[in-house]
Image (tube, rainbow, N blue to C red):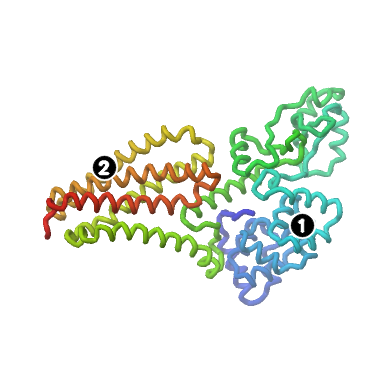
Amino acid sequence: MKQTVLEFDEKLYKLTEDLVKRGDYKRAALLLSNKHPEDVALILDKLDEEDRIKVFKYLPVELQADVLIRLDDESIDDVLKALSEKDISELVGELDVDDAVDVLGELSDEERQKVLSYVPPDEREEVKELLKYPENSAGGLMTTDFIAYNQDLTVEEALHRLKQEEKPDEVSSTIYVVDDKGRLIGEVYLRDLLKAKPNTKLKEIVREVPSVPVDLDQEEVARLFEKYDVFSMPVVDEHGKLLGVITVDDILDVLEEEATEDIHRLSGWGEAESIYTPTLKMATKRLPWLLINLGTAFLAASVVAIFKSTIAAFAYLAVFMPVIAGEGGNTGVQTIALVVRSLALGEIDFSDFKRLFVREFIVGLIVGSVVGLVSGLVAYIWVGNFYFGLLVFLGHVGNMVAGCLAGLTVPMILKFFKQDPALASGVIVTTVTDVTGYFIFLGLATIFMNHLHLL
C-alpha cells in the first residue's frame, strides 16, 4: 500500500469537512464520487477515523475499491475493521488481483478465509496462489493478469486470439511467448504482430526480455526495473516457468515505501508512520527507540563521569563538549545517508570496504581539520588559552574521523548480517561519536591539564 504525496486540494477538503461536521456523510460522499481516487484518498486520510469510515461507506463500490488501495496503512486498517466480510469481498472483486492480494494481506488468517468464501471460485484460487508469496517479494508484487501464447503460434492465430481477450489495453500491448512447458521465451509487442506476415511464427519475431525470480526481494526488483528501463517485467520460477508480471506502477509504490521506511528508520522511528497516525499510537511506536537512545545516552554519560574531576578543574570543557560530540554525530549521519543509499542501489558491496574506509578516513581528516580550526580559534579567543584552542581542534579532528568511519562501518556490518542498514545505524553511530568525542576531548584535556589555567 502506498502513502500518496500528490498536491492536496484544500478547497475540496474544506467542503467535505463542512458536510461531515453537519453529519451529512451522504452528501460528502456524493461530492467526492466524481473525483479522482487519489484526491478522495488524501481527503479521507485527513478525516477522523469515525468520519472517514462513514464517508467511505457511502462511496460507490467501484470508487471504494480504487480509493482503498490508495489510503495509507492506518486508514486501510480502520476501513477494513469497519466492513463486513461480504463488503470486503465485493471490494476485492473490483480490484486487480495483485491489489486484491494487498488488501487481503491486511486481514488476519481467519478474516481472510471468510472474505475468500464470498469470492467466486476461479478468482479465489488465483488470489490464494498469490497469497503464498511474501509481500515484499517479486511474487507478492506480481499480477497474473497477463497474456502468454505458445511460441509455435502464428501471427494470424495470435491476433485472432488477441481479439477475443478481455484484458486492459496496457496488458494487451505486450504478449509473452512461452514454450510447451510454459517456460518464458521472450516477448512480442502488439506492433510487432501488426507488422509481421500472418504465417510467421511467434518464435521468429520474439524479443529477449529480462525476468526476475519469484522470491527476489522487492528492492532488487526495483533496481532491475531501473537498470533495464522497462514498464513491466515477467516473474518466473526456478525452472523458468512464467508465473506473473510486475508493472511499473507497483515499482513506484515500492520505491516510495522503501524510501519512507529508510528515512523513518534513520530517524529512529522503526516502523513507518503516517502523519495522520493517532497521537497515542504514534507515541507508542516512537517510544522503544527513544528508550534505546536513552540507554546509549547513559553510556556516553558514563564516559563523562570518568573525567568529572578534569571538568571540575576547567569549566570551559563542559561548554565545548556538546559542540565536539554534535559535529562528530552530524558527520556520521552524513556518511550513513550516502552508504545506506549506495547499498540500497547496489553501487557498493563488501569488496569496496577497504577503499571506502581509506576515503572516509581522509574525508574525516579534511572536514575535521577545517571545522576544528574554526572552532579552535573561537575557543582560543573566548578562553584566551592557546592550549585549550589546540585541544578543541584535536577533539574535532579525532571525533569527525570517528564519525566518518562509524558511518561507513556500521551499515556495512548490518548488511553483512543481513539486517536493514538503516535499522539502527543512526543510534549506533551517534553513540560511537558521543563516546569517542567525550573520551578524546576529555582524555586530551587531562593530559593538557598543566597548560590549562583555572579561570
Residue 452 at x, y percent in the picture: 13, 53
Q: CA distance from mark 1 to mark 2?
A: 60 Å
In the rendered view, does 259 fall on the left or right side of 331? right
Q: Please, is residue 48 above or below residue 428 in the view? A: below
Outermost residue, bottom side: 22
The percent position of residue 75, horizontal first and vertical second, equals 63, 63
Relative to 379, 77 lies left or right: right
Local crowd at mark 1 within 10 Å, few (<14), some, or many (≥20)?
A: many
Task: Give how far across and how far down residue 251 sits, in percent.
Answer: 63, 44
Marks 1,2: beta carbons within 8 A:
no
The quadrant where residue 161 appears:
top right
Q: From the viewer's perspective, is 315 left or right of 341?
A: left
For the N terminus, which image quadrant? bottom right
Residue 92, numbered label = 1
Q: Which residue is mark 2?
A: 370
Q: Is residue 36 visible?
A: no
Which residue is at a point 51% across and 40% down the rendered structure image? Answer: 343
297 and 163: which one is in front?
297
**Is residue 317 at least partly visible in the picture?**
yes
Q: Position of residue 56 (x, y in %)?
A: 69, 66
Label 2 secondary element: helix
